[in-house]
Amino acid sequence: PDPLTLALGMPKAELHVHIEGTLEPELAFALARRNGITLPYADEAALKAAYAFDSLQSFLDLYYACADVLRTREDFYDLMLAYLKRAAADKVIHVEVFFDPQTHTARGIPFTTVLEGLEDGLAEGLARYGISGRLILCFLRHLPEEECLATLAEVEPWLERIHGFGLDSSEKGHPPSKFVRLFARCRELGKPVVAHAGEEGPPAYITEALDLLGAQRIDHGVRAVEDEAVLARLVREGIPLTVCPLSNTRLCVFARMSEHTLPRLLAAGARVTLNSDDPAYFGGYLNDNIRAVQEAFHFDAATWYRLARNSFEASFAKATEKAGWI
Ligand code: HPA
Ligand code: ZN
């Protein structure tokens, strides 16, 4: 088979997907009806027409607005199971799913409603599709660190069920250095830490995420190529980058796929993985990202094997689990 067919059919791990970003317009309207909520769009077509973003913030405004339809444990279950069905179709066998509890608790949804619904979905996804899943709790960086510390204190009773911690939302103006105390506490609790950095923000934010937060993976990191020293360090230390190609083009980080830094990151020897980020909003799931990348760059089979292998190696799965996949 040709390299694309091989890549589409390879077992893979997905390490950068926001569960709120898997909310398809169809499900958004179904949940709005079920919960008696009126979305500020007439129908699914009108909502889809709003998916024309010019920046991360323009996307986040819509992403947070749509999340308002998520109210009950069943809603979070339906959301997770719909994502896992799509992931299974793309040969994803392990996922580390981001969720943003502050988006929900700020609306009065109890943290347990969110956590239990997502866990119900993961359990059913394991039973139906054989996908192993973990939850990574992301803090919203546009909020004050004090609020994030309060959120962390609130979720401590459920710590065993949270695999790790991350940092997402508006990057520019909210550098990792704003959250030193928060992530020190996360590490003190024995959890792995990841952070979005170098998506819209400068390479210096990648350095801060590593040095000040102790991030074990960098989410996006695609602007690392702008600073030779930062890129060399990522390579030397084998820091995984969870790259999301369709996200980057949809949010105008790059004007077109052919301008994406993915080939330069790979050529430098960075430990790159491919991911979908917010697939409902950015034009597709993991295999859609692979198709778009292959259309632009025509990678060979060895590169696709490497990317799939990287996804397992960079995961937070146990060494015994990894040994079964690689
Ligand atoms: N960047 C930052 N925050 C996010 C993203 C992203 O790509 N998706 C969902 N929240
Ligand atoms: Zn993301």
Image (tube, rainbow, N blue to C red):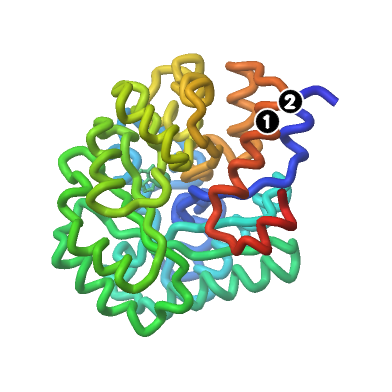
Check the image and name the residue furthest to the bottom. 157
Q: Residue at x 29, y 32 (%)?
A: 200
- Image quarter of residue 9: top right
Q: Residue at x 49, y 50 (%)?
A: 17
Viewer can see residue 269: yes
Between the residue at mark 1 and the residue at mark 2, the CA separation in whole angstroms equals: 5 Å
Disc 2 residue type? Ala
Q: Which of the numbered marks, if any, corresponds to residue 301?
A: 2
Viewer can see residue 39: no
Q: Residue at x 34, y 28 (%)?
A: 223
- Dot 1 falls on a residue whose secondary structure is helix
| Residue in the foreground of this view, choosing between 175 and 189 | 189
Other-residue count near label 1 (Cα within 10 Å), few / some / many at <14 / 14–19 / ≥20: many
Mark 1 sits near ligand 2, with its Cβ under 8 Å away: no
| Residue in the foreground of this view, choosing between 165 and 256 | 165
Q: Position of residue 67 (x, y in %)?
A: 39, 58
- Image quarter of residue 307: top right
In the picture provided, is 96 more to the left or to the right than 169?
right
Q: Which of the numbered marks, if any, corresponds to residue 304?
A: 1
In the picture provided, is 25 more to the left or to the right than 67?
right
In the picture provided, is 196 more to the left or to the right than 117?
left
Instruction: State which image quarter holds ligand 2.
Output: top left
Q: Is residue 300 above or below residue 234?
A: above
Does the CB distance between marks 1 and 2 fall below 8 Å?
yes
Q: Position of residue 122 (x, y in %)?
A: 60, 68
Mark 2 sits near ligand 2, with its Cβ under 8 Å away: no
> Is the N terminus in the top left, top right, bottom left or bottom right quadrant?
top right
Disc 1 residue type? Trp
Q: Position of residue 277 (x, y in %)?
A: 47, 44
- Dot 2 falls on a residue whose secondary structure is helix
- Image quarter of residue 219: top left
| Residue in the foreground of this view, choosing between 280 and 127 | 127
